[in-house]
Structure formats: structure tokens, C-alpha cells
Image (cartoon, helix red, strand yellow):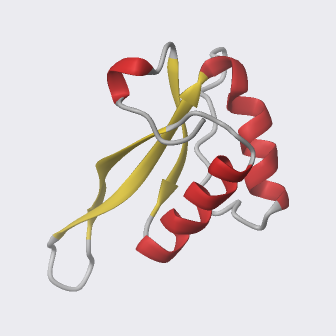
């Protein structure tokens, strides 16, 4: 189990948005180490304040059934800053 194609992931839920390659690699290593299937896609982070250029990050998706478990693993590993929490009522 590891990184898979987006079409292969059922009921995907965004759990993390990494703003740097270093952080994205840490998230990948953690999810792979725990045998979790995940999808990574490039997504917009907004615009930089200095020049107004678009910024992108790595968005991590897992099945909705594993999302809470994965968020806990990431938080315990010190990766809380990029966690994406479900909207109220979606839990």
C-alpha cells in the first residue's frame, strides 16, 4: 500500500496540504510507513504576498474511513500545520 492513482481511491478526503517539498516528503514517508493508500495532487495555496504570484502545494487524500486516523498520525508526528479538517457537519 502506498501512493495510488486518483481513480483508484474510493471516497477520497483531503487530509493534508503541504506547502513545501520537504514537508510533502515527510507526509509521504509517514503514510507509506503505515501502509496507507493515498493520492497526492498539486493544488493552489493562494498567492504570495510579495509579488502576488500563485503558490502551489501537495494535497494528500485518503479514504474517508481512514481520514481521522491519518490526521491523528500526522499530528502526533508534528505535522499539524498543514492538516485539513472536515467542515462542521461533514464528520
Q: Residue at x 76, y 32 (%)?
A: 68
> Quarter of the image holding residue 80?
bottom right
> Quarter of the image holding residue 23?
bottom right
Q: From this viewpoint, which residue is outermost toward the right?
A: 76
In the drawing, does residue 84 fall left or right of residue 47?
Answer: right
Vertical position of residue 54 compared to residue 58: above or below: below
Q: Residue at x 71, y 26 (%)?
A: 66
In the drawing, does residue 67 fall left or right of residue 25?
Answer: right
**Callout count:** 0
In the drawing, does residue 56 fall left or right of residue 74?
Answer: left
Residue 52 position, x and y percent, is 16, 74
Q: Quadrant of the N terminus?
A: top right
Residue placed most toward the observer, 31 or 1: 1
Residue 84 position, x and y percent, is 58, 43
Residue placed most toward the observer, 36 or 46: 36
Vertical position of residue 22 compared to residue 74: above or below: below
Q: Quadrant of the C terminus?
A: top right
Residue 29 position, x and y percent, is 62, 60
Vertical position of residue 11 compared to residue 79: above or below: above
Q: Residue at x 15, y 82 (%)?
A: 51
Q: From this viewpoint, which residue is outermost toward the bottom?
A: 50
> Quarter of the image holding residue 58?
bottom left
Q: Residue at x 28, y 59 (%)?
A: 46
Residue 78 position, x and y percent, is 77, 67
Amino acid at each position: 500500500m502506498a501512493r495510488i492513482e486518483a481513480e483508484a481511491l474510493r471516497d477520497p478526503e483531503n487530509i493534508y496540504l503541504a506547502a513545501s517539498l520537504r514537508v510533502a516528503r515527510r507526509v509521504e514517508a509517514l503514510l507509506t510507513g503505515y501502509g496507507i493508500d493515498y493520492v497526492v495532487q498539486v493544488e493552489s495555496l493562494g498567492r504570495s504576498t510579495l509579488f502576488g504570484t500563485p503558490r502551489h502545494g501537495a494535497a494528500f487524500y485518503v479514504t474517508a474511513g481512514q481520514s481521522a486516523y491519518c490526521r491523528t498520525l500526522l499530528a502526533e508526528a508534528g505535522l499539524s500545520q498543514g492538516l485539513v479538517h472536515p467542515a462542521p457537519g461533514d464528520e
